[in-house]
């Protein structure tokens, strides 16, 4: 039995899915088809997060839209590139839904280099959900120890308040696990409002991710270049230096695309989303990454750099921009 067939049954029997498609004309299947399920809530959520509307939930049973293409023709590089993973019929609705329903932060933090403290203003909107392997969420939303199923010590996460992945993103996580043969306990979401929002060259090689981590990265909205380059290779007295491509690898990520980075990639490669002017870059882009943190240090790290201590931002559909979300829900 193919994985896609298995995934169909994960959602609902094929006969039911066919009947629903026939009962609802295609032109009415849009983001306005609100879910009838109660939204995801948690004490740490500033507001509830809706479930996927029916058109998105149904179409996700057809992923991936195409087979992934392996990219492993350079030293230490191991990618699986889907163009697209999300069906084109819903990628726009999915982008609009997540931009409207999720809460975001504009994180400010300080770093110290050579005794000099510098303030960093994160050049994009961020949010994060999940908790590392040492803990899990009980059915009531409380945190319990992954081994004993007892409430965690109150000092396990002294700098943050972990929160569960909302149902909409968690359903995408479960689907992604099927096709990547990996498990994930964290979901990070970035919103690039304009071409000026970016992320500099970096690698997700933190120890709390374990060796050879698998990271699934989704793109929605505006097309943006995804650049990759190999890290400098330390010299060796016994072997000549390897020949590296001087030009960065560029993937023009379109809405619905997914890149799976796996194997030695994070340990040896850097990646970035550079600033861009013109084109569709000012129309907004959402990036979703699923990953797995092994120890509690990963939880503290992700919440520090993706939530911080600043205020909540939410998309204002009338103003067509992110706006601070206040106590009155505006």
Image (tube, rainbow, N blue to C red):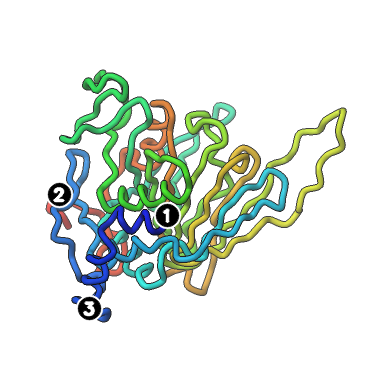
- Residue at the image position 72 percent from the left and 45 percent from the top: 75
User: Secondary structure beneath disc 1?
Assistant: loop
Q: Residues within 10 Å of mark 1 (few under 14, many from 20)?
A: few
* Residue for badge 2: 327
Q: Gap between marks 1 and 3, in whole Å?
A: 32 Å
Q: Identify the mark nearer the N-term, 1 or 2.
A: 1
The quadrant the N terminus occupies is bottom left
- Residue at the image position 43 percent from the left and 29 percent from the top: 294
User: Secondary structure beneath disc 2?
Assistant: loop
* Residue for badge 1: 1
- Residue at the image position 50 percent from the left and 37 percent from the top: 118
Q: Residue furthest front?
A: 1
Q: Nearer the viewer, residue 212 or 288?
A: 212
Between tags 2 and 3, which lies in front?
Answer: 3
* Residue for badge 3: 28
Instruction: Point out residue 15 in the picture as x, y percentages from the top left corner.
Output: 25, 66
- Residue at the image position 59 percent from the left and 41 percent from the top: 263
């Amino acid at each position: 039995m193919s994985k896609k067939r298995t995934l169909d049954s994960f959602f609902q029997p094929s006969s039911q899915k066919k009947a629903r498609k026939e009962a609802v004309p295609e032109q009415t299947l849009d983001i306005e088809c609100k879910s009838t399920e109660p939204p995801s809530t948690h004490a740490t959520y500033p507001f509830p997060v809706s479930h996927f509307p029916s058109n998105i939930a149904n179409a996700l049973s057809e992923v991936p839209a195409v087979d992934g293409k392996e990219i492993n023709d350079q030293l230490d590089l191991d990618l699986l590139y889907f163009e697209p993973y999300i069906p084109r019929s819903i990628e726009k609705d999915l982008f609009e839904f997540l931009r409207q329903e999720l809460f975001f932060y504009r994180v400010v933090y300080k770093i110290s280099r050579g005794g000099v403290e510098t303030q960093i203003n994160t050049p994009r909107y961020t949010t994060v959900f999940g908790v590392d392997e040492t803990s899990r969420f009980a059915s009531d939303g409380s945190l319990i120890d992954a081994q004993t199923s007892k409430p965690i010590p109150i000092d396990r996460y002294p700098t943050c308040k972990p929160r569960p992945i909302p149902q909409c993103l968690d359903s995408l996580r479960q689907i992604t696990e099927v096709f990547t043969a990996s498990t994930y306990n964290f979901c990070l979401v970035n919103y690039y409002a304009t071409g000026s929002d970016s992320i500099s060259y970096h690698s997700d090689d933190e120890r709390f991710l374990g060796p050879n981590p698998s990271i699934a990265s989704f793109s929605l909205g505006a097309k943006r270049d995804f650049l990759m380059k190999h890290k400098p290779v330390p010299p060796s007295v016994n072997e000549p230096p390897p020949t590296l491509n001087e030009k960065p690898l560029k993937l023009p990520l379109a809405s619905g695309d997914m890149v799976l980075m796996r194997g030695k990639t994070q340990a040896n490669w850097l990646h970035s989303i550079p600033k861009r002017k013109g084109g569709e870059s000012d129309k907004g882009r959402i990036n979703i990454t699923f990953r797995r943190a092994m120890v509690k240090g990963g939880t503290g790290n992700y919440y520090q750099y993706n939530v911080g201590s600043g205020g909540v931002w939410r998309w204002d559909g009338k103003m067509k921009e992110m706006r601070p979300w206040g106590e009155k829900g505006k």
